[in-house]
Amino acid sequence: MRDKQNLIEAFQAKREEIGQILEQLSDEAINEPETIERWSVKDVIIHLNMWEAELIKTLHQARQGIQPDTLIFNENFDEINQGWFEAYKDRELPKVLDDFDGIERQICRMIEAMDPEMLFTPGYFLWLGNHSLSGLIEDICIHHEEHHLKDLRQWLSQKGLLKAG
């Protein structure tokens, strides 16, 4: 994407779809263990929150001209995910959902505030190689959410709460 508004709208569309799924579920269903492999729906939301919080740190450091030192650039994803799972599995659902909403607002504000050249130019940041910052945002906020949305849709379909398709 080469337009801030399109990037923001694509992210918000994924968030809206997740929100629609959450609205269909009781708190008990959201907290039900091992619904999505080893995670509850709440754990999936926490997982998204944590990676997107790392993106917020990355965007902040990039705007400051600092090479990011966030977990986004660590290759031990399974260990990171497990550590976050252990640390946050008991977090109260209202707090998880508040985090989810706040992170969305913060990412959208950060995208809006960024210089378009900094955001969309491949290779602008040497630490991204020939990739753009917008591509990193797409990977974490759009593609990553879509990956987990597929799991959520499949689970809902198996429960008879969503038509397959």
Image (spheres, grey):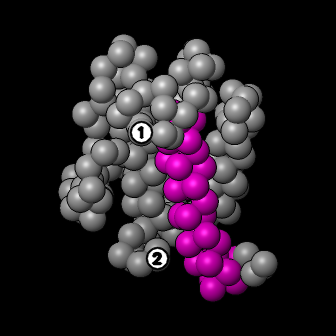
Could you tell me which residue is drawn at 36 percent across and 14 percent down?
A: 64
The stretch in magenta equals: 132-161
Please give the label number shown on residue 35: 2
Q: Is residue 39 above or below residue 60?
A: below
* Quarter of the image where one finds residue 165: bottom right
Q: Is residue 152 magenta?
A: yes
Q: Is residue 98 among what the camera can see?
A: no
From the image, give the main secondary structure of the stretch colored magenta: helix
Could you tell me which residue is drawn at 58 percent across and 28 percent down?
A: 121
Q: Quadrant of the N terminus?
A: top right
Name the residue type under label 1: Gly
Name the residue type under label 2: Thr
**Which secondary structure, mark 2?**
loop
The answer to which of marks 1 and 2 sits earlier in the sequence is 2
Please give the label number shown on residue 129: 1
Give the number of the mark in front: 1 or 2.
1
Q: Position of residue 84 (x, y in %)?
A: 26, 53
